[in-house]
Image (tube, rainbow, N blue to C red):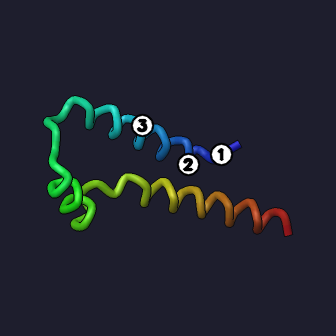
Amino acid sequence: MSSKPVVDNAETITRKILDAYLEADKSFAELREMANNGTIDLLREFSTACREDFEDMQARQF
């Protein structure tokens, strides 16, 4: 039921998670720094696509 952008972003997140298993282990401090500087912001594009999809559905409903 989701739009193509939502599905595409979900698939991208899945690939990034799977790719992370092939990388070297990172310490908690390294992960925290990556989160703080935006290096591992996996959900921003996905959540934006979901929000746009939801708003589009609402606009068609009313």
Which amino acid lies under the numbered mark 3 shown in the image of this protein? Answer: Thr
Residue 28 lies left or right of residue 52; in this view the side is left
Residue 38 lies left or right of residue 48; in this view the side is left
Q: If the image is split into quadrants, where does the C terminus sit?
A: bottom right
Residue 49 sits above or below residue 3 on the image:
below
Question: Which residue in the protein does label 3 denote?
Answer: 14
Q: Which mark is residue 6?
A: 2
Residue 50 lies left or right of residue 20; in this view the side is right
Residue at point 71% right, 42% down? 1
Which amino acid lies under the numbered mark 2 shown in the image of this protein? Answer: Val
Residue 12 sits above or below residue 48 on the image:
above
Of residues 2 and 21, the one nearer the viewer is 21
Q: Secondary structure at mark 3?
A: helix
Residue at point 67% right, 61% down? 54
Q: Residues within 10 Å of mark 1 (few under 14, many from 20)?
A: few
Question: Which residue in the protein does label 1 denote?
Answer: 2
Residue 20 sits above or below residue 35 on the image:
above
Residue at point 37% right, 35% down? 15
Which amino acid lies under the numbered mark 1 shown in the image of this protein? Answer: Ser
Of residues 33 and 1, the one nearer the viewer is 33
Q: Residues within 10 Å of mark 3 (few under 14, many from 20)?
A: few
> Label 2 near label 1: C-beta < 8 Å?
yes
Q: Earlier in the sequence, mark 2 or mark 3?
A: 2
Q: Which mark is residue 23?
A: none
Residue 17 lies left or right of residue 47; in this view the side is left
Residue at point 34% right, 57% down? 41
Specify the quadrant of the image occupied by residue 23: top left
Q: CA distance from mark 1 to mark 3?
A: 16 Å
